[in-house]
Image: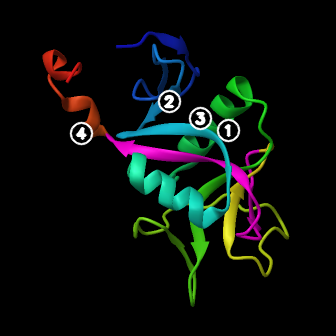
Amino acid sequence: LGEVVSTHSGLPPSFYSLGIPTGLSFIFCQGKNYHYVPLLKTWKNAQMYCRNHYVDLATIDSKAENLLLYDWLMNSTSVAHIWIGLYRGINNFKWSNGDAVLYTSWCEGCINEFECTRLDPTGWWLTENCSLQLEFICYMTETWNKLPRAEWWL
């Protein structure tokens, strides 16, 4: 369906970028297809958009995943700040899809009173006012890739 448009040396072969003929682009990483969405939305509206069109806002489970997303975004977009699916719950941070938080990439002093999380141009995460309108990353699971090739056109 697509061709490899970039690779990142030193990362496992499951990390690669594909170009989609429609002009959209995504990156596949550890069983998830991440989709950059160039629309300005509040965190909640971005979450609703992702849930309606994909699965949810992006979850990032490892340093390698964070570095790959950062590298991909910085090389393929001009965006400075992107919503991801991490938010502050009552007692701790949670992923919007309910997954456990296995990895974080907070910069020093970047956790403040705000409840939503963005990825910044340095690859660090910062809490942000949820009503701010930012572009965002959604994801789909690898089962999306498991459709037989003959059914892709349906």
Q: Which residues are magenta?
A: 123-141
Residue 106 in the image: above or below residue 67: below
User: Mark 4 or 3, which is nearer the eye?
Assistant: 4
Gap in angstroms between the C-alphas marked 3 and 2: 12 Å
Give the x, y percent position of residue 152.
23, 21
Q: Amino acid at mark 3?
A: Leu
* Residue matched to label 3: 68
Residue 143 disc label: 4
Residue 70 disc label: 1
Residue 26 disc label: 2
Give the x, y percent position of residue 74.
74, 31
Mark 1 or mark 2, earlier in chain: 2
Q: Amino acid at mark 2?
A: Phe
Q: Are marks 1 and 2 in contact (CB under 8 Å)?
A: no
Mark 4 or mark 1, earlier in chain: 1
- Left or right: residue 48 versus residue 72 is left
Q: Circle 3: is it few (<14), some (14-19), or many (20+) Cα within 10 Å?
A: many
- Left or right: residue 98 versus residue 147 is right
Give the x, y percent position of residue 48.
49, 60
Residue 150 in the image: above or below residue 58: above
